[in-house]
Image: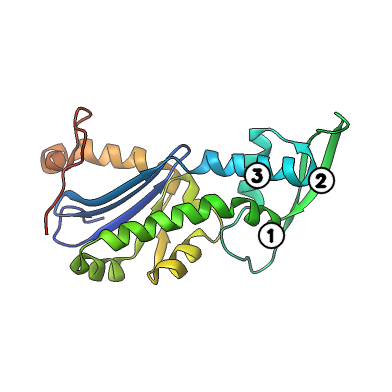
Amino acid sequence: MPVTEARGCMVVDIGGGTTEVGVFCLGGIVVSRSLRIAGDEMDEDIMQYARQKYNLYIGESMAERVKIGIGSAYPLPEEMTTTLRGRNLVTGLPEAVEVSSIEIREALSGSVGIIVDVIRETLDETPPELVADLMETGICLAGGGAKLRGLADRVGEETNMQAWIAQDSMTCVARGAGKVLEELDTLREVLVGTDERRPRTVAF
């Protein structure tokens, strides 16, 4: 993305532990937000849903498989089902329960809603001239959490902008770090040191 040019770019990186939202222009961060709600929190949402609705204790790996398998942020063209396997909290015995993608979407709605709200808040703080750029370039979703079904549709509907998923979103951070190292002389000014409390900003 042309982060060093005089046009706005917006990236939403949904990782395991945090979601980072940033608007970039001229090699600086114009607006940024960070929250500790991302993929891990979504897994916890599914675990809590299973406990509350089915008295079923499931592990993190089971929750993650369900999230990847049928999780969604937007109604699917064809809803799906899968099986939750865990331990019944009442009997203490192993149990399997069939759940639908509608139920899992309900379980994830809280975390997804917060992420969408933060994206909207970031846009609200973005200078109008950059918002015009973003309406053309759209919102880039990166990180493993970006692969949640229907998330781009949900973000697009909530922001009235096109939202798109970066190619191979799981490895964006690693590939981006490699890109910086390859062009360190050019991109040195974009970097933020670990001792800096605030990112470098661009004034408008």
- Mark sitting on residue 102: 1
Instruction: From the image, tell me which residue sits under label 3.
Output: 46
Q: Is residue 123 left or right of residue 202?
A: right
- Helix, strand or loop at mark 1: helix
Q: Describe the element under mark 2 as helix, strand or loop.
A: strand
Identify the residue at horizontal 54%, vertical 53% (top origin): 148
Residue beneath disc 2: 97
Q: Is residue 51 left or right of residue 36?
A: right
**Given the image, on which type of amino acid does mark 2 rest?**
Val
Neighbourhood count class around disc 2 (C-alpha, 10 Å): few under 14, some 14–19, many 20 upward: few
> Residue at position x 44%, y 57% from top?
116
Residue 166 shows in the view: no
Percent across and percent down for residue 155 are: 45, 63
- Tag 1 or tag 3, which sits nearer the N-term? 3
Is 41 on the left-hand or right-hand side of 12?
right
Residue 132 falls in image quadrant: bottom left
Quote the CA–CA distance across marks 1 and 2. Answer: 15 Å
Q: Does the image show residue 177? A: yes
**Above or below, comparing residue 37 to residue 156 in the picture:** above
What's under tag 3, amino acid-wise? Ile
Residue 178 in percent (x, y) is at 28, 37
Quarter of the image where the N terminus is located = bottom left
